Amino acid sequence: MQGNWHLIHGAVQANQPRHTSHWREGERERERERERGRGRVCSCEGRMIETLRGVCALLWIVSLGECKIPEFQVTCVFSKDCVLPCTFTPAHNVVIRWYRQDVLLHFFLSSEGQWDESSRMSFFKDQVTHGNASLLLQHSSPADRGRYKCQVNSTGDEDGSIVIVKVEAPITDVSIRLTPDKHIQCQTKGVYPAPSLHWATDPPSPPSLLHSSMRMTSDPHGLHDVESTLTRRPAQITYICNIKAKYSTQLWRATLMEQDTMGQSGRSLLVPCVAPKPLQIFTLSWSFSRGHDTSVLLTYDSRTRRTSGPWKGRVELDQEQVLLGNGSLHLLSPESGENTGSYTCTFSALQTRHVVQTWVNITGPQTAPSTGHKESDLWIIAVVVALLALLITAVLICKRRRARSEQKNRVTEDTEMQPMQTVKPVSESTVEASRLTADQKDTHT
């Protein structure tokens, strides 16, 4: 029996390694299956996570689109009323607040019927119940610029808007003139923000030859006055001043040209002035200046086609030609003393100003005509020469008279210095004898 036990124990020992290896291989196979299962689970979880992420991103984008506050840009005109837009879904218990740079400016509480009574800001009270929370800003000024926010709170909802406010004082007029010191000056007043200004000429000139200086001042409201002075060139050219607004597309152009003409006293004269381009609605004015005195001759309005002015009857326009842009002036009967001077023609239209300055020299019938800005100096030279001739003649005459006077004085002195001869007295007997002799001659006769 003991021998049998040894046989059984030996068989078990012999078979033990084979069973262990099979068990280990089974364990490894089961582990691989579990790994494959975990891989499949992780892969499914990853795909689900990616899908969830995409859905969340889409929902976030949609929510942003639905909740984004609308933004507006509004340009207010200086001193005018301006509306800052804001709308909401009509509801009860509405609270409206307006902020500028996060500072509360204006509000409305519908539950209490309370309005913020500001001096320059107000709501459209009759439209609030219809969803209009727009703010009316009265008499806007540069101080009103900035970022405004409208916030509307109602039951469960919040609406509003963001408004970027700009303020502009547009260009309303541009002037150009020739200064007494012979510079070209262009200016505009009451503009905000400051506009840009640049010069040009026709025919074109190199920018290096256009020497200008600019001066800008501001008034208490913050509006700018801009003035630019250009050094005048000797050539006969047209000067062009361009002024552009900063916010809008406004471009104003002012042009100036100089010319000379001459005429004869009592004879009709045409002073030319033609607009550089066709104008639809415009006014035309003529002025006359001599020295420091300037007076308006006449004005013309294309809308009414009427001419008025103190010189009516002494000057006239061609009514047919002026509508075509030819505003030349007829001097009907000019006089040399009254009508010699500077004549200025000005066309004024939308964003356009054209100035023609003409020096007119009216001469007398027998006076040689002159050109340029100065009258001829020939007659002055003639007068001076005549005066010199008279002066020389007077001097010569005086010298001759003085010489004769001196000669006469010498003769008188010489005569007085000669010795006097003795005169014998005649006796009475001699006189009587002479008388008797004379009587006898008469008797014989």
Image (spheres, rainbow, N blue to C red):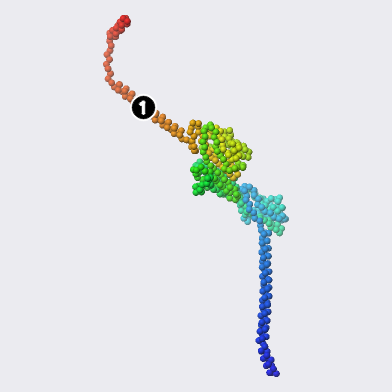
Residue drawn 61% across the image and 53% down it: 146
Residue drawn 67% across the image and 72% down it: 42
Residue drawn 68% across the image and 81% down it: 26
- Provide residue 149's location: percent of width, then percent of height: 64, 55
The answer to which image quadrant residue 283 occupies is top right
Residue that badge 1 annotates:
400
- Does 288 appear above or below 421? below
- Provide residue 444's location: percent of width, then percent of height: 31, 4
- Provide residue 328's location: percent of width, then percent of height: 56, 38
**Mark 1 residue crowding within 10 angstroms, few (<14) / some (14–19) / many (20+):** few
Whether residue 55 sits left or right of residue 142 in the image: it is: right
- Does 67 appear above or below 368? below
**Residue at the extreme right:** 92
Which sits in the foreground, 106 or 294? 294
Indicate the quadrant containing the C terminus: top left, top right, bottom left or bottom right.
top left
Give amino acid for label 1: Arg
